[in-house]
Amino acid sequence: MKIRISVGEFRLGKREEQALMEVIDSGKLSEGRKTYEFEKAWAAYIGTKYSVAVNSGTSALIAGLFALKEMYHLKNGAKVLTSPLTFIATVNAIMVRGLTPVFVDVDPQTFVITPEKIREVMKREKDIAILLPVHLMGYPVDMHEVNRIAQEFSVPVIEDAAQAHGTLLKGKKLGSFGDLAIFSFYIAHNIQAGEMGALTTNNAVIAKLLKKIKAHGRMCECNVCTRSKGICPPLDSYKGKEDFDPRFYHDMIGFNFKIMEFQAALGLSQLKKADEIFQKRNMNVFYLNEGLSDLFGILRLPLYSKDVSYLAYPIVIGDPKKIDRFTLRRELEKRGIETRPLFGCIPLQQPAYSFMKKEYQGKLPHAEYIGRHGFYIGCHQYLSKKDLDFVIKVFHEILA
């Protein structure tokens, strides 16, 4: 059957079309004025001093870990405490940077790691070098407590806020708590640009490092001060350095994580309606919870909060004897409701990390259960009341 309720959707409206045409008309496709505008706007939206745009959320993770490894002179193998229940990019980035992931269990209702579990591991393992909490599905980790722990043990914090655009924690947006934070603007996320990522920070040194890392480690910093004018400083402005062009001098190893102006333009157009997107997704979760409340027990419905910017509508099978995840997902898909599994518990259920299975066997019960029995459907802003009623009706037909 044709999919009627998709997990995510992107509609190219007049605002987006105009933004893309402006890029085409400018003749500037690689990073330029639109990228600078997006970085300024995103930092203002999150509430940080700086933002650096990169080509994906995964690149943001790698760049952020690279920056902290550089700043704190971390050796290969240094440990990063993170969530076992996340999209695999989080852990892949840790491994790519030559670091070692350490996992703690998650809260069964919000899917995120808890300060209690973090502190427990920090006391037991003295060599944790970075804390990397993940705000999964938009749910916030208790960053106030995480920061207290980080200060107590003198370790930096990276927030993985890839799925939490706009979520509030005591009135403050996620992505403004850690030493730095990362975001993804993948097509199914709340703010969409196809493929793009960003980092936010209040630390000028980190911001400078990130701008170098994303551009092959080059010395040029023109994107900090003059990109808004669309120019680079003239070569003779670098006094005392004959024939010195900082665009082609590199004082550290870096990557090509730069974006195209198209993504920045789309991100800017989406950002103008960020609050509207947040509210619509939030209301959709509330409506679905109301309509499916009588199925509580068979299903574990998402915890509702007016402060959460929901990536999707996560569901956990509450009674696997009544129905298993595969059967329920198959029946939903047959009726036109697209589904996705809830990522899996990485060290226990992802084949790429099977070498960790023995170490974590029996230690991550909540993440393991959710990884086996959790899935999600769409709650995006394009769903109508008719669509939501259809979802409620289908669930009741299957589980009657």
Image: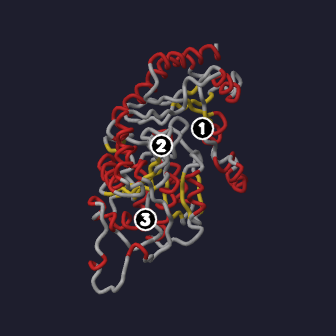
Which is nearer the N-term, disc 2 or disc 3?
3
Q: Looking at the picture, how far across and down is residue 6, in whole percent?
A: 55, 29
Q: Where does label 2 land, which residue?
A: 163
- Graded by Cα atoms within 10 Å as few (under 14), some (14 to 19) or many (20 or more), the crowding at tag 3 reads few
Instruction: Please tell me which residue lies in front, 289 or 213.
Output: 213
Image marks 3 and 1: residues in contact by CB distance under 8 Å: no
For label 1, the SS is loop
Q: Quadrant of the C terminus?
A: top right
Q: Is residue 46 above or below residue 215?
A: above
Q: Residue at x 39, y 40 (%)?
A: 167
Q: What amino acid is at disc 3?
A: Ser
Q: Which mark is residue 154?
A: 3
For label 3, the SS is loop
Which is nearer the N-term, disc 1 or disc 2?
2
- Graded by Cα atoms within 10 Å as few (under 14), some (14 to 19) or many (20 or more), the crowding at tag 2 reads many
Distance (Cα) linking label 3 and label 1: 33 Å
Can residue 148 be spotted in the picture?
no
Q: What amino acid is at disc 1?
A: Leu
Q: Nearer the viewer, mark 3 or mark 1?
A: 1
Q: Looking at the picture, how far across and down is residue 105, in whole percent?
A: 58, 46
Q: Looking at the picture, how far across and down is residue 182, in whole percent?
A: 44, 52
Where residue 11 sits, quadrant-wise, is: top left
- In the image, taking residue 31 as reference, residue 349 lies left or right, namely right
Which is nearer the N-term, disc 3 or disc 1?
3
Distance (Cα) linking label 1 and label 2: 13 Å
Instruction: Please tell me which residue lies in front, 15 or 400.
Output: 15
Q: Residue at x 48, y 60 (%)?
A: 257
Q: Where does label 1 land, which residue?
A: 342
Instruction: Please tell me which residue lies in front, 152 or 283.
Output: 283
- In the image, taking residue 17 as reference, residue 85 lies left or right, namely right
Image marks 1 and 2: residues in contact by CB distance under 8 Å: no
Q: What amino acid is at disc 2?
A: Gln
